[in-house]
Image (cartoon, grey):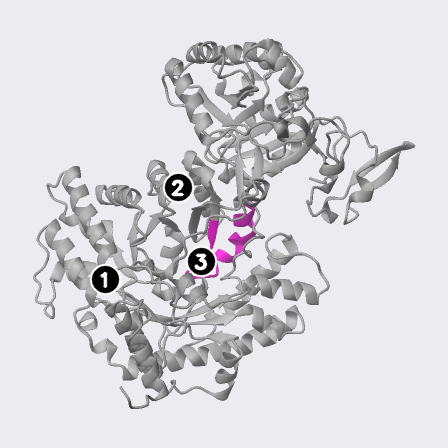
Amino acid sequence: MTQALSELQQKFHNIITNPNLSPKQKTHWLSLEAEASLPYVAVSDAVREVMADGSVCDMFEGHAPFKPRYVLPDYAVFLKNGSEYLELAPAQDFDDALNMLSIIYHHVPSVTSIPVYLGQLDDLLMPYVGELTDEQLYTKLKRFWIMLDRTLPDAFMHVNIGPADSPVCRTILKVDAELKQIAPNLTFMYDPAVTPDDLLRQAASNICECSKPHIANYPMHAAAYGDKRFGIVSCYNSLPLCGGSNTLVRMNLKLVAAKAKDEADFLESVLPYHSELMRELMNARSSFLHQDSNFFESFLAKEGLIDEQRFAPMFGIYGMAEAVNQLMDKAGKAGRYGHDVEANELGHRISARLAQLVDEMTVTYGLNGKAVLHAQGGISIDDAVTPGVRIPYGTEPDPVSYVQATAGHHQYYTSGISDILTIDETVKANPEAMFNLAKGALMAGYREFTANVASNDLVRITGYMVKLSDIARYDDEGSRTNTTFLGAEAAKNTGVLERMPRVASLEMTPALAR
Amino acid sequence: MTSAVKPLERTAKVSRILNFSCVDGPGNRMVIFLQGCNFNCISCHNPHTINHCNHCGDCVPHCPTGALQITKDTNENKVTWVSSLCTQCDLCLDVCPHQSNPKISEISVSDLLALIRKHHFFLSGITVSGGEATLQLPFIIALFSAIKADAELSHLTCFIDSNGELTLTGWDKVAPWLDGAMIDLKSWQSETHQWLVGRNNHRVLASIKHLADLGKLHEVRLLHIPGKSDLDIEVAAVGKFLAGLPESVNIRLNAFQHHGVVGEALEWSKCSKSDIEYFHSLLYQYVRRPMSLPGVYS
């Protein structure tokens, strides 16, 4: 190849010749570059400014969106009616149902091109269980689970189960704990009026085994979207079933708070100004998708698996901790977010104000004309900004204090709030403690309970506390075992020098590190 | 925690409260560490919990944030801890010549009940630990009986983590409100025990048997210090003793480590994973049922 390449061609060439990407991964990155070569959807100079300074971010969704960010098909309609487009008859038995689901998942797009929602599987599959024994059910679901992980390897691909007890629900929990795969991700719906304690105990015990499932507060989500009319997808986004999210735009509260004189200025002037620009950007992006991309002409819409009216833009925020601490500084107060009652209450006021702004805002393509508020969990490029409304890493109080400091936010974030509690691994020997924590968090008003059981820096051994870093120093060993990073961090920290893992989290890595 | 103490209400000297613990009994427990201990173990992992502060003031100039101050209390010098200024750097513990801790709160039963109420949805129960918790037995009885009499809290289980030195009469006093006790057995021969902790183990063995008879023994913990404690040398006697306990009693093997330890015990070998596994294999020949082993070794 002697001809000089244009800049764009050089990008394509770099991807195509990359030694560490599979052909499928190359195809994905090439498509992103192709889309990025088109002009950005039309927005005002004011929007360009806040995007340039980082206050507002489009999550690298692309310049010309041709698929919604998250799609939650009503798979029950598909199993019941079959599909004319896919030439499939209605499901007759359990094997039919699994086979049909395996097929349709490959036709459900998302921002990462891998589906983020695989359905409320217990409700979907229970009608087809028929005479199957528990053992047959176990074998079939285990094969299905392995197939999902090997063919659709993304940690944000989500299965939902619960709140009611059923053989499918129990078997999925059993298989998931046994296989400990990254995919699929799993949310268990909890409803104190419906879910037996021993089922929640099994879920809590699973968390100790594999940091899954997440536990969703069913009555809270049902109050927002209607009974059985929602799903939990990706990293804890709650969205309308038979619909989803057309775009996610997020506001960096850390940078926005830096522009405010004080709390009043922030709440009454700076925040409304940026919210209006968020609205403009959400409208511009969703209008292209709905009007120009022809996405809603697909068989998913024609056959009733999705309804264009049930898509809403997500109004995301992150960096609450830094925003609160800056406003506390400006007021000459020393209290810190997560630890000080006054700082925590300021955070709650900011969330309440955001919810009010989103509620009063009309968008072009929304659910009943509205966007949905979301506390966003961060992406790999975020530097020194804490995800969503979390308490900054390394300064977290004990899990009970953590929940009580942040529970006040959960009521406001209709489309989910990504908060992860890190629990030290001694809990593995005492899953009842995880059960207590999950139940306490949901009673305290948590919309979702997510816990990671990790080799945390602080580990308690009977009766006293040890810091793993202290032990390392004490033993003069020097190096601590490295955590296994997901693809996102690997790409960020090392470029693509290392082969990307087979199972990745594409959503965390919206842009290929160069 | 700072509310005025009502006259005549029981209070305790508390060195620390944890809202979340999964290693101090079943489920998540609030753990209340009480200051003061009647053992003086060479191998103590928390030596700053042994004595009550004598207000010598040696720690005060070392505090980097001025959280420790000398105040006058009926003409006596008193070390006062201002928790709002404290960064928990623990320098005061390092410099204390008296195996004590100036960061002690005097907490009443009603203050503690309010805290437990705030957290009760998250808890299976509470555990009082130490130091040696039973040195403040009247407070424990007042606290446990108040919990059991409270409609909202009565489902919470009440546990004591103890060195077993309490008298049988003492255990009988708290038994009506006690759900479980966790007792350390540090050595088998009385002479070894005397050398290791400063007292013989007659009362410890009696406490274990008595609590088992009362149905209140949750766990017996054996701290294995290779070459120092005699639990491995005396494994036949230890094993037969443990085998005689009800099957419901958890037997936990702990491995001696250096963290927190001061003085000569720092020269002792730490107990490795293979040490504890070998000890377990010896003990298992007599006990013949599952025992808990450490999750982490340093």
Q: Which element type, helix, strand or loop, lies under badge 2? A: helix
Tag 1 residue: A74
The one of A271 and B81 positioned closer to us in this rendering:
B81
Decide if residue A303 is on the left or right side of residue A176: left
Up the image or down, B208 lies above or below A402; here it is above
Name the residue type under label 1: Asp
Mark 2 or mark 3: name the one nearer the start of the chain: 2
Q: Residues within 10 Å of mark 1 (few under 14, many from 20)?
A: many
Tag 3 residue: A418
Q: Which element type, helix, strand or loop, lies under badge 1? A: loop
Q: Nearer the viewer, mark 1 or mark 2?
A: 2
Residue at 60% from the left image edge and 71% from the top image edge? A257
Residue A459 screen position, x and y as percent: 52, 40
Checking the image for residue A504, the label placed there is none
Checking the image for residue A208, the label placed there is 2
Name the residue type under label 2: Cys
- Protein chain holding label 3: A
